[in-house]
Each structure stands twice: as C-alpha cells, then as structure tokens.
Image (cartoon, rainbow, N blue to C red):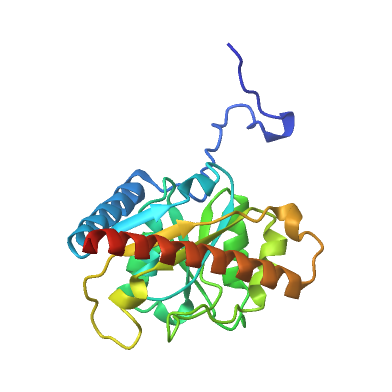
Amino acid sequence: MATLTEPENNRPAPGRPAARRRPAQDRSALGAAWYGFVRYSTATLLAATGGLRASGTMNLPRKGGVLLICNHLSHLDVFVLGLPMPRMLNYVARSTLFVPILGFLIRSVGGFPIQREGKGTSGVKETLRRLRDGGVVTFFPEGTRSPNGELGPLKPGIAALAERARVPILPAGIAGTFEAWPRHRSVPRPHPIWVHFGRPIAPEDIAGAAPEVILALMRDRLLEAQDEARRALARLSGSSAS
C-alpha cells in the first residue's frame, strides 16, 4: 500500500501534533449541515413553484479552484446556482448587503463581501485565497441585477482577477429567474428555471491577454451559456404546453 509523506520542512516539531489544514471550500460539520439544509429547503421550494433544471454540470472540475461566473437576473440566482452543483459554493456579495442578520446569513452559506466598484482590496484578496485553497467562488461580473433580462457590461476588474487567479473559469447562464423575480417586483412568483454550465475557460487561454480580450471571451461564453439555458427552457415550456 502506498503511503503519503510530508516534505521535511512541513513536518511538525517533535512532540507537537500536526496541524490540520482544511481547504476553503470545505465547511465544519455544522457549516456543511447548514449549507445542506438551505440547499434542500430551496430545492423543495423551487420544486413547488415551477421547478429547476440544469445542464452542463459535467463541465465543473471535480476538484481545485474554480471561478464560477454567471449572468445576474434576480435575487434567486445565488440559490439557483448552488442546487445542481456537487460541490459547495463560495459567494461574492456586495458589501452593502452585510448588515446585521442578513450579513450573518450570507456568511453562513459561504458568502463574503466585496465592494461593487472595486475600491477595496480585502474582497479581492479573499476571493484569491479561496480559489487558491481549492474553492469554487461564484461571481456575477455585471455587478448588479439586470434591469431587462439581458446581459449587461462586465466590470473591468473581473479580467484582472481572473488572470491573477490562474484557475478554470466556468460560465453559467440562467433563464427564468428574471420572470420569477425581476428587480422591479417586491415578491417572487412561480416560474420554471433553467441553468446551463457552459464551456470552461482554461487559465492558459487568458494568460498574458489584454483585459479587453479577457472580458470579450468571458462575455462570449456567458452569452453562449445564457442562450443555451433559454433554448432549453423554451423547449421545456413547449413540451409542457403540448
């Protein structure tokens, strides 16, 4: 049987127990249980209000850091992305959401703050740390929910972040959450939802590329994933109607 050995300089001093290292995407037993409870509760609620379907989940790397980028249509998007994924997600959320109670709830499912206009560095550092520790970090590069259901301009900072992270970039497209809960409505309504995980962008695909080239590639992959989600949802609606 093969055995794993630590490098000499990583071994604990005699008489000291080895420190346990835990990748950032993992939670404590209690944290994982809470994440699972929120995930199950959300899935149950969505099943009763239109249902959620997904495609392209095989495109998610099974281990290692992943930057998951997605179009942003609704408050529901954060919940929708985590349901079909076999790995727990970390969420980047704008710093203004981290108020008492709400901030605690966001952190409890792996969320952490970042300033929308990139005026601070703590959120960027935390994103890179979680990615380099092997986590899946979710990012909405538009920076805010779409006012009309279409993909808006991407924030320039996502290009520099992606190049520094040197991890696969997984584009996801969501369809149906805008109809279920657009930003101008105060409460959601039942509507079927589809999320498609598209073709990943490998780190070598953007290495040394200009920021505008990286943004263009990310936008193309997001539009491709969004279009696929829309087509799948249209087929589902058509089959249901017949």
Quadrant into which the C terminus falls: bottom left
Q: Residue furthest top?
A: 1
Q: Residue at x 54, y 31 (%)?
A: 17
Q: Position of residue 15 (x, y in %)?
A: 58, 27
Q: Is residue 35 above or below residue 210?
A: above
Q: Residue at x 37, y 72 (%)?
A: 103
Q: Position of residue 174 (x, y in %)?
A: 42, 66
Asked whether 84 or 176 is in front, the reply is: 176
Q: Position of residue 168 (x, y in %)?
A: 63, 53
Asked whether 19 or 46 is in front, the reply is: 46
Tell whether 227 sits left or right of 15.
left
Q: Is residue 156 above or below residue 175?
A: below
Quadrant into which the N terminus falls: top right
Q: Residue furthest right?
A: 208
Q: Residue at x 22, y 64 (%)?
A: 241
* Residue 60 shows in this picture: no
Number of numbered labels in the structure image: 0
Q: State the image quarter where residue 4 is shown.
A: top right
* Residue 17 shows in this picture: yes
Q: Is residue 95 above or below residue 30?
A: below
Q: Is residue 169 above or below residue 20?
A: below
Q: Position of residue 69 (x, y in %)?
A: 54, 64
